[in-house]
Image (cartoon, grey):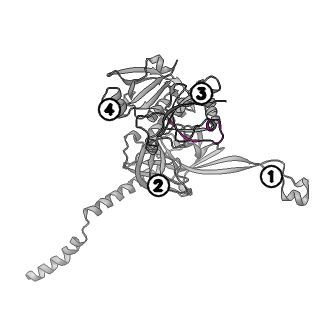
Amino acid sequence: MKTLQQIYLIACTTLLPLIVYAESPEVATLRETGRAFTRIAREGTPAVVSIRAEQEVSHRPPDFSPFEFFFGPQYRQRQPSRRLQLSQGSGFIVSEDGYILTNNHVINDAQSIVVTLKDGREFPAELVGTDPETEIALIRIAGENLPVARLGDSDAIEVGEWAIAIGNPFGLQETVTAGIISAKGRTQVGITDFENFIQTDAAINPGNSGGPLLNIDGEVIGINTAIFTRSGGYMGIGFAIPINMAVEVKQALIQDGRVHRSLIGIFLQELTPELATGFGIDPVDGIIIAQVGEDSAGQEAGLQDGDIVLELNGRPAGSVADFRNRVAVIRPGTEITLTILRDGERMEIPVVTRARDVLQEDVTSDTRRREASGLNVAELTPELRQQLQLPRDLAGLVILDVEANSPAWRSGFRGGMVILSVNRQAVTSIEEFDGVLSRAEGNQALVLVHIPRRGRLFMTLPLE
């Protein structure tokens, strides 16, 4: 029979290690988080593919070569040579019948596209369609038992959530990086025409382009597209196209091989608390119709200046950029429903969208007209407003810089000025600005500008 002292020693030698090595709650939480990332990587990587695109490029020889110098003109290379240029990127399978989403710049002008899966299978891919205005491309492979990525809801994400990027940077297969959602709804980045980027600090490097950005549930919330960098490498600022936008573009590319964009013909501005007070209403989430274009879809539907748009097809209107992007990807001729607030009364107004394509020639001409004037403008973001110390209710376009000795420069336009209106028409987007310039008659336009710390001033902008 054991003595009490022996029982005590046995208890200490068997139970004490368990007490010493028991995990703290903090360590247990970290371990659980690590297991979550492991699960996401295990479930998410099979649907991520490596894309190799070959493009034939022309190389023009120099007018004079050393061979000609030493051996005579018969050794002059007269015809340009052609060679294959290889680009690599990422993509992810979104359907069992082989559709793959990626970036337009990954497969731009490619003569051949080869897709490699995680399991080593290789497939030639066909190009279904591209949309340079959103940097989205859709390709397709023919295969069986294809792994498919689970798609999430990019509208539901919140700043601060986990974000996981998967891709093939620098040719390194199945690379997984983690970070958070740093911001959403980023516009004026200068990458595409229709921007609504998710910003993340999950490392994105060359070759990641076209790969998925996942949430903590392993669902795709974006397409990794670009990075902000001063060195050419990772600096903690990456941009991804929201998956909801990508899905809408995908459907259009499958149906038509291209995206036919819509417009309503209304000029919008953000609804600030100060403007809400001016309208005599409580602050609401919405955007203001500053002007309804003549002979536009909006005018035909009965929209009026000062209407406040609350919803588009039952969903919140969001910011001006959000609204513009959502309308743009709708097929022309589609009836949409705008929920508006007019004189305190909530109303639903059906609007039939019109094709933006018919204005493409004018828009191209407008752009040339603005560029010829020497103005480089941008839409007024909260960051620019704060930097320039502008009033919160000021709406317009900020002049980023003016080309030296250009017509605008000679007329006195300078960087930091804010363009409020052109020919007495308010402008709050570059598209509106270009449209007014295209309709301007004569060789100059009357521009109302706001000059910080000086006030407002009318100026003339030469157009020819």
Numbered mark located on residue 236 in the image: 2
Which quadrant: the C terminus? Answer: top right
Task: Name the mark nearer the viewer: 2 or 3.
Answer: 3
Precedes in sequence: disc 2 or disc 3? 2
Query: Badge 1: how crowded within 10 Å, few (<14), some, or many (20+)?
Result: few
Task: State the residue position of label 4.
Answer: 283
Percent x, y of residue 262: 51, 27
Q: Residue at x 37, y 48 (%)?
A: 217
Q: Residue tagged by mark 3? A: 445
Q: Who comes first in sequence, dot 4 or dot 2?
A: 2
Residue at image mark 1: 62
Which residue is found at the position 88% from the left and 55% from the top?
75
Seen in the image, is 281 located left or right of residue 336?
A: left
Q: Quadrant of residue 301?
A: top left
How far is mark 4 from mark 3, CA to CA? 36 Å
Alpha carbon distance from label 3 to label 1: 46 Å
Give, as a three-letter code, the residue at label 2. Answer: Gly
Q: Are marks 4 and 3 in contact (CB under 8 Å)?
A: no
Instruction: Describe the element under mark 1 as helix, strand or loop.
Output: loop
The image shows residue 158, relative to residue 174, as above or below, that is above
